[in-house]
Amino acid sequence: MSAALPLPPGVDERPAPGHAVHAGYGVRVRYLSTLYVRNHRARVGHRRGSLVVKTPDGHQRVPLEGIDGLVMLGGGQITSQALEACVKRGVRVAALRQSGAVRFVVGHKTGGNVHLRIALYGAVTDAERSLALSRAVVAAKLQNSGRVVGRWSRDATDPATSESLSWRAGQILSRVSRLEQVCTPDQVRGVEGDAARIYFRGIRELLTNAELEFLTRRKRPPRDPVNSALSFCYGLLVTEFIGAIESVGLDYQMGFFHRPRSGRPSLALDLAEELRPLTDRFVVSLVRRRQLRQDHFVSTPGDAVYLSDEGRTALIRAWERHKEREIRHPLLRRPVGRWALPSIQATLLARHLRGDIPAYPPFVMP
């Protein structure tokens, strides 16, 4: 997307707009751009079909027709006129907290077939179907987690670390078969939690000699830089799934593994589970390559650790490059961009709920 003026500090724009269609199961995805506004004093307005982002350093006009998402990372403001224009154009507006947690998401007008949403609600309230979908999502997450740890073991130069990671990969993958015997949602969560403990201990081993230390997964608030980066990226990932789920006409609050709860994007959290290992691999790679450093983070009086403005800029730019990478989709049997996976999986879930395909096929890494 071309711009008449250089982007002022605090405004980032994802490059290379365009469209893409992926054949197979009728999956169609649209690829435009995401606009990130990270200046705390930014004000986003609307004028003649464009968003106008004003900061103390200048202003930038971004045509609405060229973007499909607006992510506000600081304390900036957006006018009601700009929100209305985004809703009409189907541009998702998301605001994230300092930690990366979702504050709110505003999408386009509710679309899709009302019968599709009725089918979703029916599946959520049907204990047997809900359990089956939970097992499918968690099984995919465990397979992806095991494969990520297995690749780390093969890349490790220290034989002891390689052997330990290989053992952990096998232990995680062995938990997949246990899901076939579980009979309750709590048992599914138990298997997932057991595998997660093994998995995150593997990350701790992998980062033993890294500049940024990681001991265990801590969420609210993150207590170290690695946890901070993980939480921030999870927030970005969930906003992608919220937009994808809304675009196919589903309700992103009605989940299976994450049960519906007021204010929680449960279905987006469900589908995001499948891509969490990819996100973890991305963050670990940045840490090991020192693309994220100690000076990219700040500590608060409550011992919470968050990304600094410079750190957020570095992470967002790396995140957008990460989304451009292609990965083979096992069902479509062709490489697709990582950016397309939320739309593909949301579409496949909608097709299952409509009865077009017998089971929901979660994403499993090749």
Image: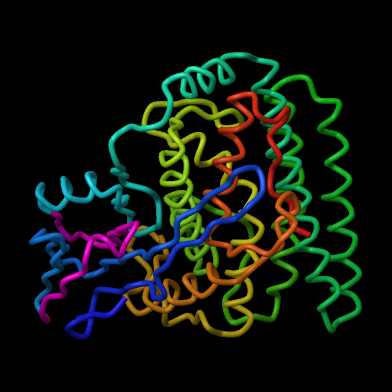
Residue 76 counted in the magenta span: yes
Q: How many marks?
A: 0
* Residue 307 in picture, x, y percent from top left: 39, 70
Q: Is residue 196 above or below residue 251?
A: below
Q: Quadrant of the N terminus?
A: bottom left
Q: Nearer the viewer, residue 5 or 31?
A: 31
Residue placed at 73% from the left, 49% from the top?
A: 331
Specify the segment rendered in magenta. 57-78
Residue placed at 47% from the left, 80% from the top?
A: 294
Q: How is the image coloured?
A: rainbow
Q: Nearer the viewer, residue 66 or 94?
A: 66
Q: Nearer the viewer, residue 349 or 174?
A: 349
Q: Quadrant of the C terminus?
A: bottom right
Whether residue 145 sits left or right of residue 82 in the image: it is right
Residue placed at 85% from the left, 49% from the top?
A: 173
Asked where in the image residue 327 lies, by quadrant, the reply is bottom right
Q: Is residue 197 above or below residue 74?
A: above
